[in-house]
Amino acid sequence: MPPIKSSTIVSSYCHGSTDNPMRQNVTTEFVLRLKREVRGEVKTLEPMSKHTSWRVGGEAELWISPADLDDLVHTMALLDESGVPWTILGKGSNTLVSDNGISGAVIHIESGFTWMHHTAAGSSPDTVSLVVGAGTPIAALLRYATQHGLGGIERLVGIPGTVGGAVRMNAGTHLGEIKDILVSVKLLRSNRTLVEIDATGLGLTYRHSAITPGEIVVEATLALTKTDPEQLRMLLRDTKERRQKSQPLTLPSGGSTFANPPGDKAWRLIDAAGLRGVRIGGAQISELHPNFIVNLGDATANDIDALIQLVQKTVEKRFGVKLRPEICRLGDWEPQETGNI
């Protein structure tokens, strides 16, 4: 199917900066101060296409990877003191960054937040408490659980992000959601206080939590059960193989684009609307799985954004269902243009 011309229609899908603030607070002197005082990595004009699973997005004005929790707290203090807005990012899956980039700082929560350790928990000898840093990739968590025979984690197979991102959006698969095994989380609030909150207080529903934009997930405690490592390994392998056959994992994507509406599947509605394989620029609704939008190699964020809105408008017109994106849309987007799709 021939590509459709891209548009610049935009809409906000989740919490994050979608305006165009003046870039006047990030001075050369401030950057030098950050590099002196922050122990982690500090970069300027960092291409976000290197840090998102869609491989699109303009430059982050500042890119900071704190070395640890103390470094994160100090980074936030420096940014707040200078009036520089900040955005949190993990592995950049389920995230669409504007082609214009992101004003202010992107704080990268990964390498300094990857601890894991487990202990016996509760009265049952088969119950295990696993404490994991928010920057830990889900893939690393699965390897650890398999090695130690910790069951319950299989519901997260194939999720491409980090533990922090999984908690924030209550990520899951057809086997279940992270809330099913989540006991509590440690959050760093915007006033730089650390609090521990029981999972029942996080407002976890289907692909949603009540965690606010100013709260950073630092650590999660999971309740798992002892199981045979080989059985768990086989289950994870079988689940992974099924996903490889049914999802376009060889092309850059943001994962599942839309949440399933009650009583139906997003992919079925998209397919029934005749949108399988439709292209806008270098972005395409996957031929293999219509709830995935893939980057064919030269897509822009605007291409992907326009496809998302085309799906929403077409499905709503055909079936009266407004699909809700699972995607976080971040950065400096142009003002919305109406009537042009």
Image (cartoon, rainbow, N blue to C red):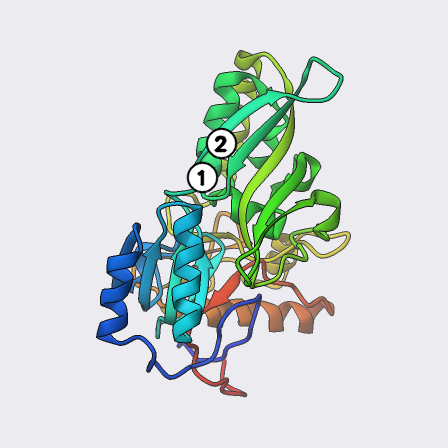
Looking at the rendered image, the quarter that the N terminus falls into is: bottom left
Q: Amino acid at mark 2?
A: Leu
Q: Position of residue 262 (x, y in %)?
A: 76, 55
Q: Which mark is residue 306?
A: none
The furthest residue to the bottom = 338
Give the Cα distance between marks 2 and 1.
Answer: 6 Å
Element carrying mark 1: loop
Q: Residue at x 47, y 80 (%)?
A: 19
Q: Residue at x 40, y 67 (%)?
A: 79
Q: Answer whether residue 49 is visible to the viewer in this image.
A: yes
Q: Is residue 75 left or right of residue 186?
A: left
Callouts 2 and 1 close, C-beta under 8 Å? yes
**Residue linked to disc 1:** 137
Q: Residue at x 64, y 55 (%)?
A: 259
Q: Say if 181 sits above or below 64 in the image.
A: above
Q: Say if 171 sits above or below 144 in the image.
A: below
**Residue linked to disc 2:** 141
Q: Amino acid at mark 1?
A: Pro
Residue 92: quarter of image: bottom left
Q: Position of residue 310 (x, y in %)?
A: 54, 71
Q: Position of residue 80 (x, y in %)?
A: 44, 69
Front position in the image: 181 or 65: 65
